[in-house]
Amino acid sequence: MLARLACPLVRGRPAVARVARPPFAAPLLVGRRRCATQAQPVDEDDGQSDASKPSGQQPIADLGSTGKVGSPSPWTSDAWDAAHVTDDAGGDAALQQPDALLSEASMVIPTSEAEAQGLPSNSSILSAYESQLQRRSSRHLGYPYNLSHSQTGDDLGRFMRYSINNLGDPYVPSNYGVHSREFEVAVVDFFAKLWKAPADDYWGYVTTCGTEGNLHAMLLAREALPDGIIYTSAETHYSIFKAASYYKMDCEVVRTLPTGEIDYTALRSALDANRGRPAILNVNIGTTVKGAVDDLDRILRILSVTGYTREQYHVHCDGALFAMMMPFIEYAPKLSFERPIDSIAVSGHKMLGCPMPCGVALTRKSHVKNVEMRVDYLNSVDTTIMGSRNGHTALHMWHSLRTKGLEGIKADVAACLSTAAYLCDEMTKAGITCRLNDLSSTVVLERPAHEPFVLRWQLACEEDIAHVVVMPNVTPAKVDIFVAELVASIAEHGRTQSRRSNSPLALLSSDAWGSAGAPFDNRQGV
Ligand SMILES: Cc1ncc(COP(=O)(O)O)c(C=O)c1O
């Protein structure tokens, strides 16, 4: 299905009609079944001899087999233990509703003596808030945030006294000295090594979140290929559509396979149809709802067979969660700048587990030169989406990476994949409809019919499905509590029925996602 976002006349381009983003509907096709720990071995030889690899850069260890830097992570534990956090008298309601101390009336910031009369003390409000955070952290399964960072505060709490601001470019210090650029550059260097960016040709920065990384990437793409069309799947995170809308870029929304991967045949047709214009590919390295990984190599092959030369395409990989996981999974497809790609974005509060939203954007140097502007006031150059930039996040990312090391992150990822498989198996045994994509820790399930249950566990839902994203703080013990509560909820409140014949739940229940027989291998040819 082809759709374009609104494009009033921009930089000489004609306007095209606004077409709403299509629903996540896809025809029935054969997909892959759950196989969390057995990724398909694909293209192990990347075709580059050691001699041809960029020089001057210390290559990162082959994480699949020999990653020895760091220690096993102590973070794969239930920081907020669901079994021991009290539910309060109100059960479901108490978990979600603020107590009286956090009501609008208590929270008001008084502007007169009269308004201040009778207000609860700040300390009582803060205690109530802390208790609410603990309760909610103990039953949080729906969003891909690693909540296990309880020890970080011990080391980094003292830095909250400082106004750490990395305004300007990470590599061009501004006159403002209270920054954490050294940490930021170290973090970017780490990701450059992880994703094998050439030593003399990468640029990156610590962003506010994965969304900012995507906004930055699409801006660079538009500057590189002003007449380019964005191709991205219907199950893409909204930030890419937001970028298309902000920057007035044409966008072809390509339908998906039932698993959530881009439909490669439809992509090829779209590329063929628009052969006269450059292509900007957004490749989902893990979709938001189903955790589906688009096959980067297959997309590159499609570009090649449809006749797009390297100058005519630009590839961004949106790896908000998975770009931090793929390099640590044995036999996972390679996510690497050794491929002809242009940028990768990842979130820092997801797999890495920073307590505040953050991320990393990495690209090739030449692209950022296109947007660079000198700003005298900063005594630096403006290359980032934001002006003032949170210097604490760079510190937290650095701390997390240094403390966990490659071994620790690898252990976290392995634990997530295995606990996700356990969750899927336990729900299947209990008769609950669920699926788990290859390479993924996102378990998709039928939407629980009882809405308070959804809120209690903070499940993210889309139409008639929900998902649980298994992060390092989700242990098998927590899974047991969740499944037991879900079974009890179903017994009491019943189950969600598919809302239409090809709704997400209908696809989830059918063999279209993958049958018990031979899994569909979508990597054979294009
Ligand atoms: C695939 C994908 N891209 C981008 C984002 C945005 O990341 P953030 O929440 O860090 O802005 C998400 C968030 O879940 C995502 O799943």
Image (cartoon, rainbow, N blue to C red):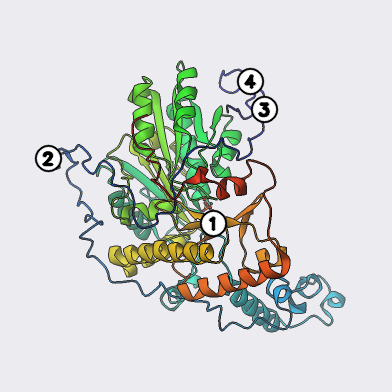
| Amino acid type shown at disc 3 | Arg
- Residue extending furthest toward the left: 51
Q: Which residue is mark 3?
A: 18
| Amino acid type shown at disc 1 | Cys
- Residue extending furthest toward the front: 517
Q: Is residue 324 left or right of residue 194?
A: right
- Residue extending furthest toward the top: 276
User: Label 2: how many residues lie within 10 Å, few (<14), some (14-19) or many (20+)?
Assistant: few
Q: Earlier in the sequence, mark 3 or mark 1?
A: 3
The residue that appears at 38% across and 47% down in the rendered structure is: 204
Q: Quadrant of residue 11?
A: top right
Q: Which residue is mark 4?
A: 15
| Residue 435 image position (x, y, % from top left) | 50, 54
User: Label 1: how many residues lie within 10 Å, few (<14), some (14-19) or many (20+)?
Assistant: many
| Amino acid type shown at disc 4 | Ala
3 vs 1, front mark? 1
Q: Which residue is mark 2?
A: 51
Q: Which residue is mark 1?
A: 434
Report the Cα–Cα distance between label 4 and label 3.
9 Å
On screen, residue 127 above or below 355:
below
4 vs 3, front mark? 3
Q: Which image quarter is the C terminus in?
A: top left
Q: Quadrant of residue 76?
A: bottom left
| Residue 69 image position (x, y, % from top left) | 24, 65
The mark tally for this picture is: 4
